[in-house]
Image (cartoon, coloured by chain):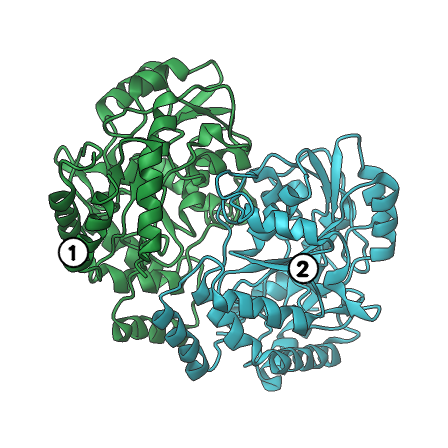
Chain colours: A cyan, B green
Amino acid sequence: MIQVTKPFIPDRKTLDKYLDGICERAWLTNNGPLVQELTQRLEDYLGVQNLLLVANGTLALQVAYKALGVEDEAVTTPFTFAATPGSMKWQGITPHFADIDPNTLNLDPSQAEKAITERTQALVPVHVYGNACDHDSFQDIASRYNLPLIYDASHAFGVQYKGESLLSCGDAATLSFHATKLFHTVEGGGIVFKNRDDLERARSMINFGQSPETPNDIASVGINAKMSELHAAMGLATLDSIDQIITQRAALIQEYHHCLKGHVEFPQRRGSENGAYMPILLASEEQASAVDSSLQQAGIRPRHYFSPALHETTTYGNDDACPVASDIADRILCLPLYPELTTHQVKWVCEHVCKNL
Amino acid sequence: MIQVTKPFIPDRKTLDKYLDGICERAWLTNNGPLVQELTQRLEDYLGVQNLLLVANGTLALQVAYKALGVEDEAVTTPFTFAATPGSMKWQGITPHFADIDPNTLNLDPSQAEKAITERTQALVPVHVYGNACDHDSFQDIASRYNLPLIYDASHAFGVQYKGESLLSCGDAATLSFHATKLFHTVEGGGIVFKNRDDLERARSMINFGQSPETPNDIASVGINAKMSELHAAMGLATLDSIDQIITQRAALIQEYHHCLKGHVEFPQRRGSENGAYMPILLASEEQASAVDSSLQQAGIRPRHYFSPALHETTTYGNDDACPVASDIADRILCLPLYPELTTHQVKWVCEHVCKNL
């Protein structure tokens, strides 16, 4: 059986060393030394400032909205994981969907601008598959309408764009460190804020609104969105291997592209390849379905990632028309991708894809 | 230095055995086998049904409100941790505070009833220090006003009340398994639902609203509130020692009561003693402050738990008058309590308390 992905398990001795420290200190959570160390090491590795680690990637989005004062409506893409609109609607923000660019599969800036209403309080584009959004255009719109620009950068760990980290774009960029991601902390997430003030507000919010400056008061609304020391330990042990992980995944993507070029479409890439996903676009819904069935029969588990487009779901559906997203969602497949996968297996997967075209 | 609490660290070999399994399976989260095992073992140990494990105790409250349709106002106590109103306000629910009973320090049912308005959609009493609320009265009010009754039972792990688990009371009872709790999963929480339907709705909500029954749709709003396998491993290893933990903590409480009886007041206990906290009430704010200073100087760290009363904070303050809660918050101290504490240390703490009375 070849799954679409497989969590990376770091060297056990490295992990145990961190666990020894946790047990010795009996400091298990609440901004412990490993969370602090991971924050510093990730800021250095990613080339960013003002990183706040949190319990998971959905909470990263929820805290970013709250820290930036987003409460009413936000414009986003329907071609994303359910966490993007879910994080909004859970806390009373209405997601308003605009259509995507058929080449990059990211939110189309011109469509996003058309979707802005008087109630819009943020733009929330997603760097789908780690593929950089058209940041210059989004920044221009955000500035003209005076809206916070929050990127769901769950897939964009380590992506470089125009000479800097893609995570430095926007007022906030949120990361997911879920077990299935190329860098993970089992469950976890992060927010890179442009401004230090927003970071500090968010830091209080993830710890019940408590702040060292006002010990006898609750200065802001807050919940618990803290990353634990155990999860930080997994992150630190994984970070030791991150260059190797990205190199291996990127090489597998090259192999896929080599085998499938001319047979299927690939989304147009913007920014460096971080090896996050291996998406292909089939010619039609029928072809995508046939390829999927054939792969499943061979014990290969691709994923219709993302399908259905979220403007067509019961929970998030509304009158927003996004025909490009609907079409893409019908034709997309993500193929298996994880470091242990061999080039032989990749070729085998590609054979099964091609024989159904 | 004697802290107010110290996280329990389970036997390392037991913990390692669980970690071996996690690494071998490479199944790190998403309702894995250890989360399933912990759910079953906790249901058996606690004597409850319909338990859902989640990422932390605040998310337990947030998911309970959402699963039970609470969106507008809820009546609760101001004498609680900031997580209780924080979990509400974060997702748009207005906490409306009613005063507490001066003996049990729990929400006073008659005050709660007076606080009900047309907008009230739930009663959210807290079993403070694991001390059972007056459930019969709350159930009566909830039935008469047709309101869901949601207990914040963060402190009430293992409490028996009128011959059954206190967690069986209410439409939902939420638990915190934070590292500082007597039973913990590092970070974690749980919800005990009265009805199976509510459990299943919540199960979908903690996994992005996805449901196996509707694979091509998002059937409900959802976020990520899943407990990881690593955290479940810590819970399983801790659960092996839970009877010993509770016995040791309860014995220390007895020792405290023996030493301090006649010198300070204790909240009146309802339900079995689970050894969660060691609260004392001093005669005045001045006396509480003097005792605190003296203990701090001796390297003992008690906690003003809970102070300030939340109706007096910037974030949650409003016109609700709760004079009893205000008075209690000024006079309360929680003394150090954890299994490793010796009776000798307890006597020493008590001496420092008594010499300031």
Q: What residue is disc 1 on?
A: B248
Residue B61, compared with residue A101, is above or below; it is above
Vertical side of B250 occupied by B192: above or below: above
Q: Residues within 10 Å of mark 2 (few under 14, many from 20)?
A: many
Chain letter belonging to callout 2: A
Q: Amino acid at mark 2?
A: Asn
Q: B59 left or right of A197? A: left
Between A257 and B91, the one lying in front of the other is: B91
For mark 1, name the chain: B
Q: Nearer the viewer, residue A148 or A356?
A: A148
**Whole-percent x, y for residue B81 in the image:** 40, 39
Residue at figure coordinates x 40%, y 22% from the top left: B322
Is residue B260 visible in the rendered image? The answer is yes
Q: Nearer the viewer, residue B115 or A36?
A: A36
Q: Are marks 2 and 1 in contact (CB under 8 Å)?
A: no
The residue that label 2 is drawn on is A50
Describe residue B46's horizontal placement relative to residue A331 as left or right: left
Is residue B153 something that shows in the picture? no
Of A1 and B259, which appears nearest the observer?
A: B259
* Residue at disc 2, secondary structure: loop
Please tell me whether mark 1 sits on a helix, a strand or a loop.
helix
Residue occupying image coordinates x 35% and y 47%:
B293
Question: In x, y percent, where is residue B214?
Answer: 50, 45
